């Protein structure tokens, strides 16, 4: 399906793109090729194929959350560049 120059100009207007006549011809060919690819996909027989969001099964690479003992606060605060009581002191982000 070959798009007309007016259709390309209309698409460019919707996308808020400024175009020259050369741009229109280039985009006309490119958009027509894209639509041809979609046409091929429309002809694929998908009868009996369940819709899916992914073509392969997903496998989580994240580990399960496990409750365990925390690191002692004193050990953590020993590496803090500045501390204030039992807290790490940081520079103010908002004033």
Image (spheres, helix red, strand yellow):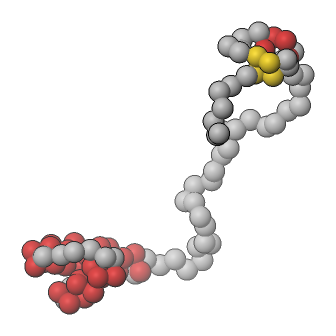
Q: Residue at x 29, y 82 (%)?
A: 13
* Closer-to-camera residue (51/17): 17
Q: Residue at x 33, y 76 (%)?
A: 15
Q: Position of residue 11 (x, y in %)?
A: 30, 82
Question: What is the residue that sits farthest to the left in this orientation?
Answer: 22
- 47 to 74, vertically: above or below: below
Direction from residue 9 to residue 68 in the image, left or right:
right
Q: Quadrant of residue 27?
A: bottom left
Residue at x 68% of width, y 13% of height: 81
Answer whether residue 63 is visible to the viewer in this image: yes
The C terminus is located in which quarter?
A: top right
The answer to which of 43 and 32 lies nearer the viewer is: 32
Going by the image, does 65 lie left or right of 12? right
On the picture, is 80 further left or further right than 9? right
Above/below status of 1 relative to 94: below
Where is residue 71 shown, x and y percent of the image? 84, 17
Q: Nearer the viewer, residue 11 or 64?
A: 11
Image location (x, y in percent) of residue 92: 66, 32
Q: Quadrant of residue 50?
A: bottom right
Quarter of the rendering occupied by the N terminus: bottom left
Q: Is residue 1 visible?
A: no
Would you say 27 lies left or right of 91 here? left
How many marks on residues? 0
Identify which residue is drawn at 55% across, 80% down: 47
Residue 30 percent location from the top left of the image: 22, 72
């Amino acid at each position: 399906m070959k798009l007309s120059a007016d259709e390309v100009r209309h698409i460019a207007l919707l996308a808020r793109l400024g175009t020259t006549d050369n741009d229109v011809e280039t985009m006309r060919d490119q958009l027509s090729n894209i639509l041809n690819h979609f046409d091929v996909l429309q002809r694929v027989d998908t009868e009996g194929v369940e819709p899916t969001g992914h073509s392969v099964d997903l496998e989580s690479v994240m580990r399960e959350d496990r409750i365990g003992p925390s690191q002692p606060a004193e050990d953590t605060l020993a590496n803090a560049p500045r501390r204030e009581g039992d807290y790490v002191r940081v520079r103010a982000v908002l004033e």
